[in-house]
Amino acid sequence: MNLNDFLIPTQDICRRPGPFDRVVLTSRVRLARNLQELPFPGKANKQERQQLLQTVQPVIETMPVMKEGFSEEIAKLTDLDRQILVERHLISRELAKKTQGAAMVLSVDETFCVMINEEDHLRMQAILPGLQIKEAWKAIDKLDTMVETKLPIAFSSQFGYLTACPTNVGTGIRVSAMLHLPGLVIAEHMQQTITAVNKLGLAVRGLYGEGTEALGNVFQISNQMTLGESELEIIERLNKVVLQVIENEENARAKLLETKPEMLFNQIGRAYGILTNSHIISSKEAKNLLSLLRLGLDLGYFPDVDPAVVDELFIVTEPAHIQYEAKNKDGEALKKTPEERDIRRASLLRESLEKMPGPVMDASGSPKD
Amino acid sequence: MLCNICNQNEATVHLTQMLEGEIKKMDMCESCAQKQGVDDPSGISLVDLLVGLGPSSTESQPKTKATPLTGMSNCPKCGYTQADLKKTGRLGCAECYATFDDGLEHMLRSMHKGVRHKGKTPKGFRNTRELEAKTKKLEKELEKAIKDERYEDAAIIRDSIKALAHAISEFETETATS
């Protein structure tokens, strides 16, 4: 099946509601698992990786949640498809680079995605919109328990689930929430927040996880330690911290509104101006401005505008999505240069925001009714 | 954004770390990042920093002092060596955890909250857990028996502990091969 026929349209993905979705974009729980007998993917030879794939893929495909899902070897996907999957946060950048024996199985609702032969034999994840860490854990735990009855998973009573990297051993769990924190960034409280979250043994990362920049004021908070604590202890702690960060973000927004309304309105108004009038725009600039637009929406400066329109632009202005749109709309299959994409992105933004009225705000800084 | 090291290429690797309570940020191009050995912040640098193995490329470190990882040097199952572990920050197979046991515990202690798994256990292993809990209890009893100079009791308890250890190891190999 063609990947793009399978994927849920971006506007539908962005309309899925979730708790605290003003601040929390998604919650994700990922489990790392390996088979007892075969070497880990980094050590395995081609034959062993292929053998692993042939053992594991049919088992995952037959899981009830994967019914009518999308199961494919990475080597059989085009570069563009792989990049689209990374931009949708469905597979890791690491998996996208692997070919021999690497595969993915994605559920029809895109809640579950299993990566095969990534750093570990199996990386199983559940993603839900908004703050739903516990629900995501329950969902992936259930899938994991079923997989365990079919495959001999590497486990030791001392070290727990054995993983290629010692930083994942034990529970093999990575719990993360993706947060939109423009208030804390504008109020210059982000550094403090990161320090405080780090002190609690949690990591703060950028939009695409490890080693990436926080574009568009989007941050990921995730656990680092996986051994010596139960899954529930890890989840409870992360949930607590995220709730605190949400509160801080809302407070920062309220305080900015109260003390520096002109500054806020200026930033949001300029973001609207540039997005609706630019002819060349990079992905980074677009994201940072879209973040301000989304903040304006949250604060009520764009009455009657559907936030999903802005949220969707976050995804469709990513490089591979721009390339895909060009290919689909105009049949331009040739790979675009970054400069060509910047032109295309600007025109997409102008078209999409054409009907969106400018921000409404009176001189006192409060949104007009 | 330009690379902080060579100031020539576009920075594509962004490393953020907490050092002495401060957030340090580095932006590097791919080749400089590789030279620094930070092309994978989760693995190499973490392991190096925490265990004091030194960067994998450091040749000046004398071999005898370089690594706290003692025990067998090669994994009998996959052939992984300590040098591989040091270089990649990863293990080769499930068996490596037993092979590099001693040094690993030291490494894990600095990475995690504890060195014993506390979470979910696969169904088959739950039995082993119970056996291990029993062993612990018996070990305490043994200690007390010796202290009280009840040597006959101690001998009986010791035999029970041996039997349990045997059962656990049999169970683990059984589960592993099934």
Image (tube, rainbow, N blue to C red):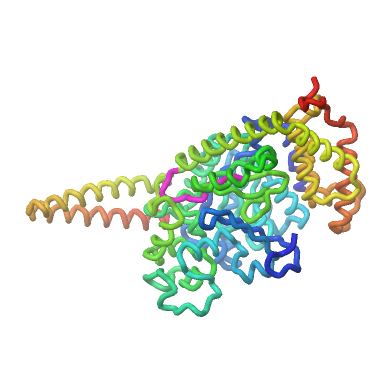
Q: Is residue B146 left or right of residue A10?
A: left
At which x and y percent is residue A27? Answer: 60, 39
- In the image: residue B34, left or right of residue B117: right
Magenta portion: prevailing SS class: loop
Residue drawn 80% across the image and 20% down it: A369
Front position in the image: A182 or A73: A182
Residue range of the region highlighted in magenta in the rendering: A220-230
Q: Residue at horizontal 44%, vertical 64%?
A: B96
Let me know if residue A197 appears in the view. Answer: yes
Q: Quadrant of residue A287?
A: top right
Magenta-span inclusion, residue B164: no
Pick whichever, B95 or A10, lies toward us: A10
Asked whether the viewer can see residue A129, the reply is: no
Q: Is residue A342 above or below residue B102?
A: above
List x then y, in percent, for residue A143: 54, 41
Give left or right: position of A200 versus A334: left
- Image location of residue A6, percent across then percent down: 74, 43
Q: How many marks?
A: 0
Rendered residue at 41%/66% (across/down): B100
Q: Which of B128 and A351 is in front in this view?
A: A351
